[in-house]
Image (cartoon, rainbow, N blue to C red):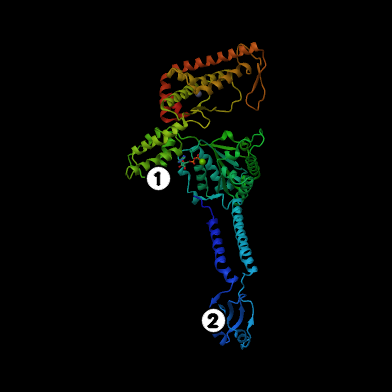
């Protein structure tokens, strides 16, 4: 991965040890040398001999008359200090006086150490050493802090192609996400093509999806494909270090990115800085808010034509501040959903290629048994299987290793995430086909575009997507009623096939109730009330909040009319499904096996 350019630093303890040694040497060796001169003890006759030979230069008689200290030249002509016992020698004084060289009577052996030197060596020198080391430390600390502050030097990791080494080939499945990112890569390859007709690319693309679906991987692949500098930082890194630095780091990041353009800036886990700002409470998280504000400012300030593309990833899009998602900021949202069967097979293949596999393994069987698993889970399955093969003393991964590791990885995962059991999957499949069949068998409906029983980021366990052929602004009474029937179709299928009802229809019920109520109170579509507004919309910008504008008796009657409308729609759904039981079973089986089917597949099966 990326290499941080840090020079290896010796630990601080190293410098402390050095200073300890220096102080010790001063105390034990240098100080004594200065405090008293080296003194050699000799006998009296040596003293007399030196006197004879005129080598004595200075003499001192100690206070009590017991000792004589003297300085004399040694055999090499060097001054040396000696001490000897004093003999009761009355002639000594005359002899000294009559010596040929003039002997000085001076103080030779200080009985007390020189107070100045003591002061110098015991206080000033250690103090100087400590101050010096302190300076050294603080300079190092400063450069280290400097590194932290200047973004590109240590805390940002710059990936280029050779370093991420990832390309789109490493990302299996996720074709829609790859296609959307492809455009960005193309732009970075050849910005001329876009700028020459005045087009500018979206400033930011937000990868949204559950953990482990390959968002980070996709961003790295974009960098690899585009072969441009890739600045990567995770949201938590902005916040972690020092208070007030988050905003500075954002500024620095964008400054550097503009210098290096064309390039990609990737902010992983952007929800850590991009959380909704709330204005209640006293303290709030000022630091995070400043960082977010700085990010918003920078995003407004930079010009995407220069070739800086901002990518971000999150698995909690609903918690992001709406200001971030405004046009001109992260205006493109790229969903990265959990893989379906085909996607899981592809992911298993990508990762299986990295380990030694027996040619007999059936990856499709493994993919079938791992519904709801993410790409990261599947990568983990392969790795666990390889580890197990090693434990078993095999040189290749066999099917049983894979099956065993599915148990280990997915079973734990299923408990954690309450993933879908096979029975639940069957119910969900019938539920979704119920919606789709009721849609297909009525005339006033939009065609089915896609049906899936892969759980969505939104929390839905499956969904049936219809897409109108052209833009619609008006809804006829018949179309509205057909829509109600489609919404009840899921529950109707559950009732017909399993003779029971599940909580899975909660969202359908809510939508159906809202639509039916609007039909009665606002669209004038009930025979009983006609064109009387029974509710008014209070705020058209904030959802469909309404206020009743009728008496409470009328309100009770409205409730009744809404119920009747929904019941009628439900009956229609039941009758449609009863008439097409064979197709319901066939399609549900097919969906169960494939997990995601397209509109065309659906229509073909329906005609067959
Ligand atoms: P996210 O950022 O969405 O949480 P990552 O990108 O970190 O997930 O994915 C974690 C790992 O899971 C990847 O390094 C890769 O090994 C594996 N993985 C996830 N999705 C895919 C995929 N579509 N194809 C291949 N490997 C994948
Ligand atoms: Mg990630
Ligand atoms: Zn439903």
Contact? badges 1 and 2 (CB < 8 Å): no
Q: Regarding mark 2 in the picture, which secondary structure is present there?
A: helix
Q: Regarding mark 1 in the picture, which secondary structure is present there?
A: loop
Q: Nearer the viewer, residue 520 or 404?
A: 404
Quadrant for the C terminus, please: top left
Asked which quadrant contains residue 377, the reply is top left
The residue carrying pointer 1 sits among few (fewer than 14), some (14 to 19) or many (20 or more) residues within 10 Å by Cα, namely: few
Looking at the image, tell me whether mark 1 or mark 2 is earlier in sequence order. Answer: 2
Q: Does residue 417 appear anywhere in the picture? A: yes
Q: CA distance from mark 1 to mark 2?
A: 93 Å
The residue carrying pointer 2 sits among few (fewer than 14), some (14 to 19) or many (20 or more) residues within 10 Å by Cα, namely: some
**Horizontal and vertical percent position of residue 375:** 45, 38
**Horizontal and vertical percent position of residue 38:** 56, 74
Q: Nearer the viewer, residue 453 or 503?
A: 503
Residue at horizontal 40 percent and vertical 29 percent from the top: 593
Disc sitting over residue 334 in the figure:
none
**Horizontal and vertical percent position of residue 426:** 42, 25
Disc sitting over residue 354 in the figure:
1
Residue at horizontal 55 percent and vertical 58 percent from the top: 16
**Horizontal and vertical percent position of residue 548:** 66, 17
Residue at horizontal 44 percent and vertical 30 percent from the top: 595
394, above or below 282, in the image: below
Circle 2 sits on which residue?
44
């Amino acid at each position: 991965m990326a290499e941080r350019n840090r020079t290896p630093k010796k630990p601080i303890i190293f410098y402390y040890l050095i200073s300890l040694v220096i102080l010790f040497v001063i105390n034990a060796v240098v100080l004594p040398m200065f405090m008293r001169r080296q003194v050699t003890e000799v006998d009296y006759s040596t003293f007399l001999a030196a006197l004879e030979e005129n080598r004595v230069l200075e003499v001192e008689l100690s206070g009590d008359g017991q000792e004589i200290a003297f300085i004399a030249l040694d055999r090499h002509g060097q001054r040396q200090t000696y001490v000897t016992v004093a003999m009761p020698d009355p002639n000594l004084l005359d002899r000294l006086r009559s010596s040929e060289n003039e002997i000085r009577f001076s103080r030779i052996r200080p009985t007390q150490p020189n107070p100045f030197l003591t002061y110098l060596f015991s206080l000033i020198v250690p103090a100087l050493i400590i101050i010096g080391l302190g300076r050294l430390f603080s300079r190092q600390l400063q450069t280290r802090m400097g590194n932290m502050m200047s973004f590109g030097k240590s805390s940002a990791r710059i990936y280029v192609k050779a370093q991420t080494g990832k390309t789109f080939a490493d990302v299996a499945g996720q074709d829609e996400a790859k296609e959307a990112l492809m455009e960005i890569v193309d732009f970075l390859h050849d910005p001329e093509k876009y700028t020459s007709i005045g087009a500018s690319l979206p400033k930011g693309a937000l990868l949204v999806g559950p953990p482990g679906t390959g968002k980070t991987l996709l961003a790295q692949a974009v960098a690899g494909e585009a072969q441009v500098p890739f600045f990567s930082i995770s949201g938590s890194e902005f916040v972690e270090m020092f208070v007030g630095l988050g905003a500075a780091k954002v500024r620095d990041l964008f400054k550097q990115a503009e210098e290096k353009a064309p390039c990609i800036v990737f902010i992983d886990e952007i929800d850590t800085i991009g959380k909704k700002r709330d204005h209640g409470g006293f303290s709030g998280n000022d630091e995070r808010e400043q960082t977010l504000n700085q990010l918003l400012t920078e995003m407004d300030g930079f010009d995407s034509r220069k070739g800086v593309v901002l990518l971000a990833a999150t698995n909690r899009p609903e918690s992001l501040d709406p200001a971030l998602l405004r046009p001109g900021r992260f205006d493109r949202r790229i969903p990265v959903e959990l893989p379906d069967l085909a996607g899981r097979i592809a992911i298993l293949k990508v990762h299986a290629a990295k380990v030694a596999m027996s040619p007999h393994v059936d990856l499709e069987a493994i993919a079938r048994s791992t519904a709801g698993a993410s790409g990261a889970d599947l990568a983990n399955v392969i790795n666990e299987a390889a580890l197990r093969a090693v434990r078993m003393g095999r040189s290749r991964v066999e099917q049983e290793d894979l099956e065993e590791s599915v148990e280990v990885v997915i079973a734990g995962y299923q408990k954690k995430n309450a993933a879908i059991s096979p029975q639940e999957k069957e119910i969900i499949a019938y539920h979704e086909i119920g919606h789709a069949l009721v849609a297909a068998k009525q005339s006033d409906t939009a065609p089915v575009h896609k049906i899936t029983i892969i759980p969505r980021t939104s929390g839905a366990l499956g969904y049936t997507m219809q897409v109108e052929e052209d833009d619609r602004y008006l809804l006829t009474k018949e179309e509205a009623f057909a829509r109600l029937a489609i919404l009840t179709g899921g529950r109707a299928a559950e009732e017909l096939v399993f003779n029971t009802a599940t909580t899975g229809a909660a969202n359908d019920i809510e939508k159906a109730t809202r639509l039916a109520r609007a039909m009665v109170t606002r669209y004038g579509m009930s025979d009983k009330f006609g064109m009387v507004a029974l509710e008014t919309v209070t705020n058209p910008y904030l959802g469909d909040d309404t206020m009743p504008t009728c008496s409470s008796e009328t309100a009770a009657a409205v409730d009744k009319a809404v119920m009747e409308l929904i019941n009628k729609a439900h009956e229609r759904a039941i009758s449609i499904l009863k008439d097409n039981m064979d197709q319901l079973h066939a399609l549900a089986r097919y969906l169960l096996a494939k997990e995601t089917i397209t509109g065309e597949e659906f229509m073909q099966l329906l005609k067959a």
